[in-house]
Image (spheres, rainbow, N blue to C red):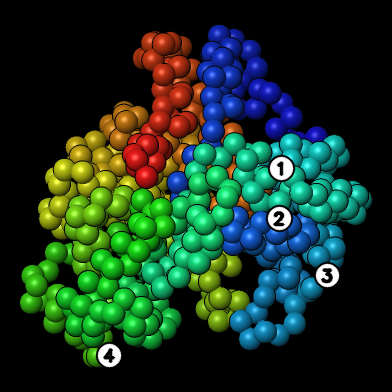
Amino acid sequence: MGALSSDNLLLGDEGSQAGLARALYRTVCDLPIISPHGHTDPAWFALNEPFTDPAHLLVVPDHYVFRMLVSQGVRLDDLGIARMDGAPVEADPRAIWQRFAENWHLFRGTPTRLWLDYTFEKLFGLTEPLSAATATEAYEQIDACLKRDEFRPRALFERFNIEVISTTEGALDPLDHHRAIAESDWQGRVVTTYRPDAVIDPDHEGFSGALDAFGELTGCDTGRWQGYLDAHRVRRAFFRSHGATATDHGLQSARTANLSGADAQALFDRIRSGRAGEGDADLFRAQMLTEMAKMSAEDGMVMQIHPGSVRNHHGGVFETYGRDKGFDIPSAIDYVHALRPMLDAVGMEPGLSVIVFTLDETSYARELAPLAGVYPSLKLGPAWWFHDSPEGMRRFREMTTETAGFYNTVGFNDDTRAFPSIPARHDIARRVDCAFLARLVCDHRLHEDEAFELARELTVDLPRKAYKFDEPR
């Protein structure tokens, strides 16, 4: 059926380099999955209820899928994407699936095609390519699988050989599902990640009310600068008590600032009172990235920075459907000047770990690799989002290895809401890395025994270490 039915996918077919790539891959293909950053729903693992149907598992929650369909004129309503005002949208999962199948050809050559072909074949046993003609048969086969206990979330977690998976929750989340998982007799390791964007970004809808709730939740006075910072410390400790090892920050800019205490207080007062002037919101976000880095230096939480996405590019789609509907668009980022205030403040702190991601590939060789290649606190996150593809992964290795090496990177993470695609994404990353290592050996730039060591390190050792999963709980 799909391209992943080929054992040699991305590894080459002939020659010594292809043979070595395949040999390297065989040593890592069955290693456990470390999934240190993503957006799967902890309720799946807490409740362990069956997934409802193929459409709501594979189409409706996956912006990689529906953004492509929208680009070719399919309406979000017709894909069952809920409206903010509760107005009716397509509710028949079979109709949603049929529209998806009729447009399956749109995904030719894309990583989404690789992920879903792998999922269709390896997980659900489909043997025919998806199309309008095979849509009903494929739907019924997947639907029948989802009704069986071995396709419930916890069973799939174990089948996928996931060692640990991180979800991402906002600062106000009560983490009830994580508590339920911890109190259950299930042994799967699901940890949370602290994502405080809603109480850090003054342009976030509902920001003022979120700060009020932040104060009520923590018992801190979020009307004052120090009380607001204390609220973050309280919530970070709460998240750590539920397994969190990391924070995550998805602001558009990587800009940081390091204001004096008096200037930070004055800025916060303007923001909190609604008297913010032009540029204050951006300066506040910049200051808060540095404050989060300072807190990470104190409490040991790994800090992830995911900048460079212009969120909700189409105002009408955002107002009608809300966030994460495929209209987040990459933009250029300046890291050298943007990160300097934070790095001046804490960049040489022992034990601090800041993992930086980018959607601006031009910054890899010019800025990010040189920064990570000298600052002990900086590590490079893997190819991300729009570049989470075979070509994007290759470019990442080619543009960063010469300056930052391998050990200033953190392995792979899938960053997905699409739970069934996780094995496919990790498999593709392993194949790309093995092919890259084989090329270095054949170019006489790496010894063969080093390549075998690196294949394992890139797959499991580096992500365990980077996200502190190898430390005692």
User: What's the residue type where badge 1 is placed?
Assistant: Thr
User: What's the residue type where badge 4 is placed?
Assistant: Gly
| Residue at which label 4 appears | 274
Q: Are marks 2 and 1 in contact (CB under 8 Å)?
A: yes
Q: Is residue 46 visible?
A: yes
Question: Crowdedness of circle 1 by 10 Å Cα count: few (<14), some, many (20+)?
Answer: many
Question: Crowdedness of circle 3 by 10 Å Cα count: few (<14), some, many (20+)?
Answer: few
Sequence-wise, which precedes: disc 1 or disc 3?
3
Name the mark on residue 214: none
Residue at 53 percent across and 71 percent down: it is: 323
Q: Are marks 2 and 4 in contact (CB under 8 Å)?
A: no
Residue 348 position within the rendered picture, expressed as x and y whole percent measured from the top left? 14, 45
Q: Quadrant of the C terminus?
A: top left
The answer to whether residue 111 is above or below residue 41 is: above
Residue 310 position within the rendered picture, expressed as x and y whole percent measured from the top left? 43, 66
Q: Quadrant of residue 333?
A: bottom left
| Residue at which label 2 appears | 58
As measured in the structure, the alpha-carbon distance from the residue carrying label 1 to the one carrying label 3 is: 22 Å
| Residue at which label 3 appears | 92
Name the mark on residue 119: 1
Q: Are marks 4 and 3 in contact (CB under 8 Å)?
A: no
As measured in the structure, the alpha-carbon distance from the residue carrying label 4 to the one carrying label 3 is: 45 Å
